[in-house]
């Protein structure tokens, strides 16, 4: 028996040596192998170490989330409180179950949810207490969603418009909850909602939230995806500081970036277009949905009555960013060159630069001019577009990364996870299914008077979103060329993404190359 304990301790010690590179060459894979051998012999700390190395990802070549969950639970059973917390988080997210969320029954998710709640309560960890304070509210299930033909739905919703203004979103299928903007789509989530305390909400709108993981290593996997995400975030910061949050988000949604708002339309028929036309990735165009396919969905929200201003900051911004109204407020010019010159005057007026700038509280947007043709044919105008922004209860990472100045005093900044509103929550959203089993040509007649599919969206088409975003990035490019490879972390407004100016320059050079070749502003994926 003594030899058994000596063996497991030896394996655990060897795991530490390989993990830290003490006395041997650092080798995370060998470290994990040694930890797992010690764990199988009952070494509790080795159980947690094995779980941690598999949970985080990026440390070893073949991380296994299932293995991480297994060893967190085993260590929790042995009384390890840190493992209780982590096992509770995994169960709370319903991640212990290997099957995809949309294929699981509600009973299965409920079992894991309850297990997670119990583990978090037992671990007596402050982080768990802050997470539990929001938990316990089960997300309303989608029950009895009306299913109608295209014509029946169109006539029903048009009648409703006589008494209330709405905004809409159409999709060719109903995806697994929650409904959230593209910026949050890589995130893990639970089927179960959180009840937010109004005092801690960023925008004080809505009460139902879902869990969002903020562990970048686990989310973005390989180095290339993490770097691409980091560059996108850097560009977003530059744009936010140059043009303000509402305008930046409105442009990003149409320029191929991830925005923090959900694409919606003031026009029911535009929403029906996106519900009845499928995107052909190979051709970069939309085509009619074929009969017999799965049902489509239309989401509908009441148009918020909140006032809106382009001067709004992160806290004061409206829940709806009225992209269509925004571009109507800009002045008109004849050529793109005139528009670019007006943007340059605007940037000079606010003394904006990629390294040092002190923005005024008020931005002179009246200096910006847009070409008439570009404005009327922009995707925002053609799609009668807007963005619906969910409410957020930020965790510690988001508070630090985004520098949410002015957030309420006493907020629990030790919470590790963000809570993001589910925009399909039945308390704020109506959902309707379209029966596509027998689609006919006559069903598409409703869409006759809207622009053609190529006008609504074409991958090879310049847009004012590209004109404005490109010329902001051009300023960054010029300054970066002068500065060389100065690490991006030295910029005061930037979080430490670990991406240098050299990385940004590489993206911008590729952007320039494709622009010159195709006469199109490069949208990087």
Image (cartoon, helix red, strand yellow):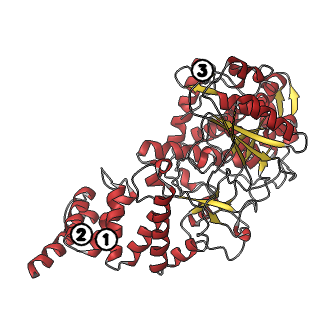
Q: Secondary structure at mark 1?
A: helix
The one of 334 and 67 positioned closer to us in this rendering:
67
Q: Position of residue 95 (x, y in %)?
A: 44, 58
Give the residue displayed 55% in from the left and 44% down from the top.
231
Horizontal arrangement in the rendering, residue 142 relative to residue 325 (left or right): left
The disc at residue 39 is 2
Task: Examine the image and state in which quarter residue 268 appears.
Answer: top right
Q: Is residue 34 visible?
A: yes
Give the residue displayed 80% in from the left and 53% down from the top.
318
Does residue 511 sit above or below 243 in this rendering? above
3D distance between C-alphas at marks 2 and 1: 9 Å
2 or 3: tag closer to the N-terminus: 2
Task: Examine the image and state in which quarter residue 138 appears.
Answer: bottom right
Horizontal arrangement in the rendering, residue 361 relative to residue 407 (left or right): right
Q: Position of residue 393 (x, y in %)?
A: 65, 64
Select label 2 or label 1 by which is in front. Answer: 1
The disc at residue 74 is 1
Is disc 2 in contact with disc 1, using a CB cutoff of under 8 Å? yes
1 or 3: tag closer to the N-terminus: 1
Q: Secondary structure at mark 2?
A: helix
Horizontal arrangement in the rendering, residue 162 relative to residue 190 (left or right): right
Does residue 275 sit above or below 349 in this rendering? above
Give the residue displayed 44% in from the left and 72% down from the top.
85
Task: Examine the image and state in which quarter residue 290 appears.
Answer: top right
The one of 243 and 395 positioned closer to us in this rendering:
395
3D distance between C-alphas at marks 1 and 3: 58 Å
Mark 3, residue position? 516
């Amino acid at each position: 028996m003594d030899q058994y304990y000596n063996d497991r301790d030896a394996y655990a010690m060897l795991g530490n040596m390989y993990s830290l590179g003490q006395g041997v060459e650092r080798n995370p894979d060998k470290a994990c192998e040694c930890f797992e051998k010690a764990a199988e012999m009952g070494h509790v700390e080795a159980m947690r170490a094995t779980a941690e190395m598999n949970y985080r990802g990026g440390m070893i070549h073949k991380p296994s989330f299932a293995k991480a969950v297994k060893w967190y639970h085993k260590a929790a059973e042995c009384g390890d409180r840190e493992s209780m917390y982590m096992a509770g988080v995994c169960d709370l997210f319903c991640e212990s179950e290997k099957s995809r969320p949309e294929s699981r029954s509600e009973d299965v998710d409920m079992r894991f949810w309850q297990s997670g709640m119990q583990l978090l309560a037992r671990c007596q960890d402050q982080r768990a207490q802050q997470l539990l304070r929001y938990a316990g509210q089960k997300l309303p299930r989608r029950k009895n969603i009306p299913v109608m033909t295209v014509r029946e739905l169109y006539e029903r919703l048009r009648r409703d418009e006589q008494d209330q203004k709405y905004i809409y979103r159409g999709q060719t299928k109903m995806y697994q909850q929650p409904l959230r903007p593209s910026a949050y789509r890589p995130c893990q989530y639970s089927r179960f909602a959180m009840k937010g305390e109004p005092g801690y909400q960023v925008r004080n709108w809505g009460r139902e939230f879902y869990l969002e993981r903020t562990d970048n290593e686990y989310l973005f996997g390989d180095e290339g995806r993490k770097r691409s995400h980091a560059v996108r975030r850097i560009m977003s910061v530059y744009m936010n500081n140059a043009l303000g949050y509402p305008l930046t988000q409105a442009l990003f949604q149409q320029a191929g970036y991830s925005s923090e708002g959900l694409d919606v339309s003031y026009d029911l028929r535009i929403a029906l277009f996106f519900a009845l036309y499928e995107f052909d990735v190979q051709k970069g165009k939309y085509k009619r949905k074929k009969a017999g396919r799965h049902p489509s969905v239309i989401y509908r929200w009441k148009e918020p009555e909140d006032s809106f201003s382009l001067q709004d900051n992160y806290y004061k911004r409206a829940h709806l960013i009225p992209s269509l109204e925004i571009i109507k407020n800009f002045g008109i010019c004849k050529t793109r060159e005139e528009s670019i010159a007006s943007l340059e005057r605007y940037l000079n007026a606010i003394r904006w630069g990629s390294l040092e700038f002190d923005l005024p509280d008020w931005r002179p947007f009246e200096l910006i001019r847009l070409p008439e043709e570009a404005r009327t044919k922009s995707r925002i105008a053609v799609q009668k577009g807007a963005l619906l922004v969910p409410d957020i209860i930020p965790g510690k990472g988001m508070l630090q990364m985004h520098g949410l100045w002015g957030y309420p005093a006493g907020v629990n900044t030790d919470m590790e996870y963000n809570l993001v509103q589910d925009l399909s929550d039945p308390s704020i959203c109506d959902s309707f299914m379209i029966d596509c089993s027998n689609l006919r040509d006559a069903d598409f007649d409703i869409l006759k008077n809207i622009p053609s599919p190529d006008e609504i969206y074409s991958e090879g088409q310049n847009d004012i979103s590209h004109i404005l975003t490109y010329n902001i990035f051009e300023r960054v490019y010029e300054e970066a060329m002068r500065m060389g490879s100065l690490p991006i972390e030295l910029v005061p407004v930037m979080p430490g993404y670990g991406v240098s100016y050299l990385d940004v320059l590489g993206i911008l050079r590729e952007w320039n190359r494709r622009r010159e070749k195709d006469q199109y502003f490069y949208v990087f994926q």
